[in-house]
Image: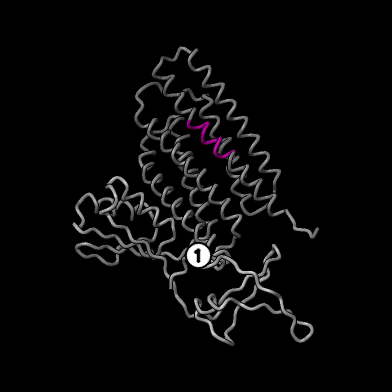
């Protein structure tokens, strides 16, 4: 049964029964839509905000979100965008139709989509219809696990970048594209999970976070994705550059341990509340950003040649942006800290 068009809220009057118990009736439409009947049980939860939440504990209704994509109405350049949009919407079934069938370019896009996401498989295929099903239960991979996996991918990539800038063979960066794709896939997964949490109170509990924090985690994931983009860019710069190596005392090499130490402090404070560590990390990052800005300004005065100067400028710019995105993460953690520390009082 479709739920679209239903009222978002209704005002109900409290009634006193038995002289000591207050009751409120439930909307009939809500009861029937969840397959409930008289004497069935519902769970009433008292939320930290003071609100009550009614959960249809005995509901026999099983629902599935489906999205249908008609390729006849979509330019080829936008097919992947629509598939990703369906995935992020929380669709469990994505049905693709085309009256002319699917050509090689269509199937290449489908494969790219499956590789870019998590848990999506083709379950049904005919000449003019393909159905993709999400096989991954969102609660099987908590948000903290996804964030930590993204952190490990980016930190290992930047560690390899540091080694390459310090003289190691640039071949250690050859898997940069694979790491970049995995970071993107985790970002899509987390945005899908956050969207589901915002819609489902049950997922909010099983995923171990509340809706407000989930939306902030989504912002953290976007900063990780941007860090991943720049670490991938740096890796390509190093692998394709044929000019002079950086001197070992280059600021670009020295900044990386500062980022690593700051990032480690921030990741550890996703769960704990040592806000002084977040402050320290942000101070170190801002100092590194200022140093890189000065470095970039002076590059054009140094006698290193235009090719070397441009190479170092691009490296510095990406490192600076990585530090800036990490500083943004510190601000998000400060937001989370203040929300966790806040209390509601009666006026």
Residue 336, position in %: x, y? 65, 50
Would residue 148 appear left or right of 2 to someone viewing this image? right
Q: Residue at x 71, y 43 (%)?
A: 276
Q: Quadrant of the N terminus?
A: bottom left
Task: Judge the density around disc 1: few (<14), some (14-19), many (≥20) Cα neighbours within 10 Å.
Answer: some
| The one of 54 and 210 positioned closer to us in this rendering | 54
Residue 206 percent coordinates (x, y): 55, 66
The percent position of residue 78, horizontal first and vertical second, equals 32, 47
Q: Which residues are magenta?
A: 318-327
Q: How is the image coloured?
A: one colour
Q: Residue at x 55, y 78 (%)?
A: 28
**275 and 91: which one is in front?**
91
Quarter holding the C terminus is bottom right
Q: Is 113 located above or below residue 311 in the figure?
A: below
The residue tagged 1 is 139
Nearer the observer, 4 or 107: 4
Which residue is depicted at the point 31% across and 50% down? 79
């Amino acid at each position: 049964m479709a739920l679209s068009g239903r009222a978002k809220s209704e005002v109900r009057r409290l009634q006193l029964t038995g002289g000591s118990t207050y009751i409120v009736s439930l909307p009939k439409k809500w009861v029937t839509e969840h397959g409930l009947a008289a004497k069935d049980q519902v769970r009433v939860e008292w939320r930290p905000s003071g609100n009550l939440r009614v959960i249809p504990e005995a509901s026999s209704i099983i629902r599935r979100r489906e999205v249908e994509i008609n390729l006849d109405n979509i330019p080829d350049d936008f097919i992947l965008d629509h598939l990703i949009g369906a995935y992020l919407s929380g669709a469990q079934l994505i049905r693709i139709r085309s009256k002319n069938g699917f050509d090689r370019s269509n199937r290449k896009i489908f494969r790219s989509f499956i590789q870019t996401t998590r848990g999506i498989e083709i379950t049904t295929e005919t000449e003019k219809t393909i159905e993709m099903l999400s096989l991954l239960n969102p609660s099987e991979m908590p948000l903290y696990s996804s964030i930590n996996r993204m952190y490990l991918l980016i930190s290992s990539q930047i560690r390899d970048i540091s080694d390459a800038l310090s003289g190691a063979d640039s071949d250690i960066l050859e898997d940069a594209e694979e790491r970049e794709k995995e970071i993107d896939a985790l970002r899509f997964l987390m945005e899908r999970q956050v969207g589901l949490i915002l819609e489902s109170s049950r997922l909010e509990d099983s995923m171990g976070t509340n809706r407000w924090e989930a939306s902030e985690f989504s912002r953290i994931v976007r900063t990780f994705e941007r860090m991943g983009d720049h670490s991938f860019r740096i890796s390509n710069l190093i692998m394709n550059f044929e000019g002079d190596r950086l001197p070992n005392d280059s600021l670009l090499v020295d900044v990386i341990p500062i980022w690593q130490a700051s990032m480690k402090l921030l990741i550890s404070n996703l769960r704990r509340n040592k806000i002084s560590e977040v402050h320290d990390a942000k101070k170190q990052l801002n100092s590194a950003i200022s140093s890189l800005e000065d470095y970039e300004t002076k590059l054009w005065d140094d006698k290193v040649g235009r090719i070397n100067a441009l190479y170092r400028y691009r490296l510095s710019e990406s490192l600076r942006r990585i530090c800036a995105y990490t500083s943004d993460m510190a601000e998000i953690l400060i937001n989370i800290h203040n929300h966790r520390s806040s209390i509601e009082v009666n006026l």
